[in-house]
Amino acid sequence: MAGKIYRISGALVVAKGLEGVQMNEVVRVGEERLIGEVIRISGDQA
């Protein structure tokens, strides 16, 4: 599954196009593939 970064604010990244993602799921973010965790889900945004 791959989404697109929608917004960045400090350490918080919001991505769109992530249907099916679950709370507390570990994800990779950006070209550097940094590790993140899903802490909120709203529609197709996480």
Image (cartoon, rainbow, N blue to C red):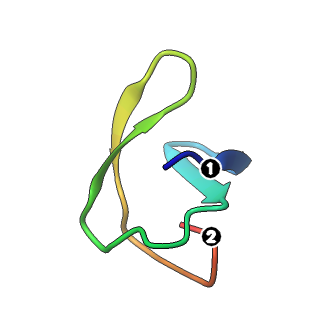
Q: Residue at x 62, y 57 (%)?
A: 14
> Label for residue 17?
none
Q: Residue at x 24, y 66 (%)?
A: 24
Residue, far bottom = 43
Mark 2 closeness class: few <14, some 14–19, many ≥20 residues within 10 Å: some
**39 w.r.t. 2: above or below:** below
The spot of residue 25 in percent (x, y) is 26, 60
**24 w.r.t. 7: above or below:** below
Q: Residue at x 63, y 55 (%)?
A: 15
Q: Is residue 9 left or right of residue 18?
A: right
Q: Secondary structure at mark 2?
A: loop
Hey, what amino acid is under mark 2?
Gln
The spot of residue 18 in percent (x, y) is 56, 63
Which residue has dot 2 on it? 45
Mark 2 vs mark 1: which is more N-terminal?
A: 1
The spot of residue 29 in percent (x, y) is 48, 35
Hey, what amino acid is under mark 1?
Gly
Residue, far top = 32
Task: Work out whether residue 14 or residue 11 is closer to the camera in this orientation and state it.
Answer: 14
Q: CA distance from mark 2 to mark 1?
A: 9 Å
**11 w.r.t. 15: above or below:** above
Which residue has dot 1 on it? 3
Mark 1 closeness class: few <14, some 14–19, many ≥20 residues within 10 Å: some
Mark closer to the observer (2, 1) = 1
Q: Is residue 25 left or right of residue 1?
A: left
Q: Is residue 38 left or right of residue 29?
A: left
**12 w.r.t. 43: above or below:** above
Q: Residue at x 62, y 49 (%)?
A: 3
Q: Secondary structure at mark 1?
A: loop
